[in-house]
Image (cartoon, rainbow, N blue to C red):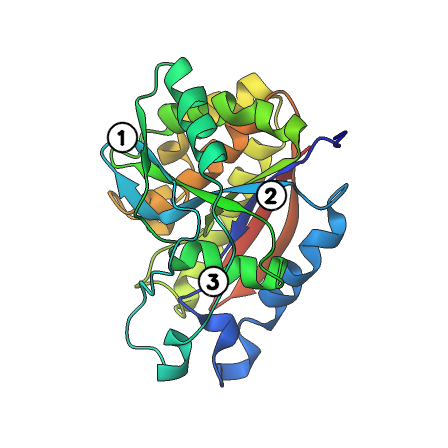
Amino acid sequence: MNTQRQPVLYIPHGGGPCFFMDWTPADTWTGMAAFLSNLAATLPEPPQAIVMVSAHWLTPRFSVTGHAQPELIYDYYGFPAHTYDITYPAPGQPPLAGRVAALLSAQGESATVDASRGFDHGMFIPLKLMFPHANIPVVQLSLRQDLDPQAHIQAGKALAPLRDEGVLIIGSGMSFHNMRAYGDRRFSPLSDEFDHWLTAAVASPAAERELMLQQWAQAPHAYQCHPPQHEEHLIPLMVAAGAGHDEVGEKIYSQRVMETTISAFRFG
């Protein structure tokens, strides 16, 4: 089957099951929900499959979901009871999981297939908006626990050939993720400066982009936006940037959410 090359995305997945709550204050998440709901229409064609890199799965070495029909992991706490009844019956794709692990291993990155692990909310919450019919096979890729930026950039490079096979690679996180800062106006200018730096890094030529992202901790207010040892919501961007290869990235969404700036990016 002839397919068009898929882009690579880095998207925000919001706060827990925020898009599917009965009530949220002041329409906090409506703009982000609209952005996610419209993303599929921007793709060259429906993807054959999806590789989802979620901020909510960390392992000692890279791991890939290998179950044919993974269960959902409701890994959020204190939300209304109905949000634990959310369904998203997307199939897994064990052969793709094996291919992902093989591509990583070929580049010297130890990787395993986890045949029992389910889909966490970093996967099913945004995909329920993006592809509501849940008919596209998905495999989920973990982050490496050390959160090393270069290792994750290299992982993205290893997976880049999948794009020419109709596979959509998505990094799911948040470009600002300091739980104590959400809702605090003192962080608005800090998040703006970090977002400006991140946008410039993504839009830089590949070699410069890679160097900047490796050194993201030197960005303005980096650790105010992503506290040390809690940068897991930024690291999926590294995989996306690596998979973007030599293509210049661009910002495709940005909004003030809970007094902080949250953005999304695309490569290709």
Q: Is residue 261 above or below residue 104?
A: below
Q: Amino acid at mark 2?
A: Phe
Label 2 CA crowd tier, 10 Å (few <14, some 14–19, many 20+): many
Residue drawn 51% across and 26% down? Answer: 159
Q: Is residue 89 above or below residue 250?
A: below
Image x and y of residue 31, in percent: 62, 68
- What residue is pinned by disc 3? 14
| Of labels 2 and 1, the one closer to you | 1
Q: Amino acid at mark 1?
A: Arg
The answer to whether the residue labelled 1 contacts the one labelled 3, judged by CB atoms less than 8 Å apart, is no
How far is disc 1 from disc 3 in space, using C-alphas? 26 Å
- Which labelled disc corresponds to residue 265? 2
Residue drawn 41% across and 47% down? Answer: 54
Q: Tell whether 145 sits left or right of 246.
A: left
Decide which of tag 2 and tag 3 comes sooner along the chain: 3
Decide which of tag 1 and tag 3 comes sooner along the chain: 3
SS for callout 1: loop
SS for callout 3: loop
| Of labels 1 and 3, the one closer to you | 1
SS for callout 2: strand
Image x and y of residue 198, in percent: 52, 39
Image x and y of residue 220, in percent: 42, 40
